Amino acid sequence: MRYRRAGIPGASYFFTVNLAERSRTLLVDYADVLRTVIREVQSRHPFHIDAMVVLPDHLHAIWTLPDNDKDFSTRWMLIKSGFSRRLPADEGRNSSRITKGERGIWQRRFWEHLVRDEEDYERHVNYIHYNPVKHGYVAKPVDWLHSSIHRFMTEGIVSTDWAAGNQDEDSNKYGER
């Protein structure tokens, strides 16, 4: 795994980022747009995506930042705004968002967690890859298209039958909360 010791600049972080309207499916409907925007932001503000899963209404990711950099907030702001600008303006917006000229696609905030050590890193990677099963989208992590688990399989880090066993047992084994 690529876990880097938490020293803030150059650290690894786990993120959860949600759509404002959790009933929408924009992240999978426009997965190619999201992928393009992320690559554009990475080219200007480098970071490594260690693991990621994109679900219809939210995503989870682990990023490792460059050694001299701790600014994940700017990266998320650029990703969220770049994605929003490329979508049709058909979402609901409250008066606060209208006054501020904001789109209503994303929740304003996101959740981040500084990865503490190798065990914490592995637990969060497993959580990311198991998340589509947890939400009932697929029976096995490998069946979810929008997941870094496919890269992990290609690199031989996990097998194609990873977490394909008993779901009750797996939910504890793979860091479900």
Image (cartoon, rainbow, N blue to C red):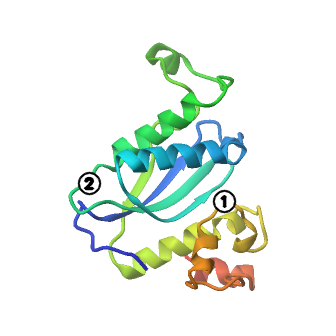
Name the residue carrying label 2.
Answer: 70
Determine crowd level at label 2: few under 14, some 14-19, many 20+ residues with C-alpha closer than 10 A. some
Residue type at mark 2 is Lys
For residue 146, the mark is 1
Q: Is residue 100 above or below residue 78?
A: above
Kindly identify the amino acid type of the residue bearing the numbered disc 1.
His
Distance from disc 2 to disc 1, alpha carbons, whole Å, reads 26 Å
Regarding residue 177, the answer to whether it shows in the image is: no
Residue projecting furthest to the front: 43
**Which disc, if any, is residue 176?**
none
The secondary element bearing badge 1 is classed as loop
- SS at mark 2 in the image: loop
170 or 149: which is nearer to us?
Answer: 149
Left or right: where does residue 9 sit relative to residue 98? left
Q: Is 141 displayed left or right of 125 in the figure?
A: right
Q: Looking at the figure, which quarter contains the C terminus?
A: bottom right
Quarter of the rendering containing residue 168: bottom right
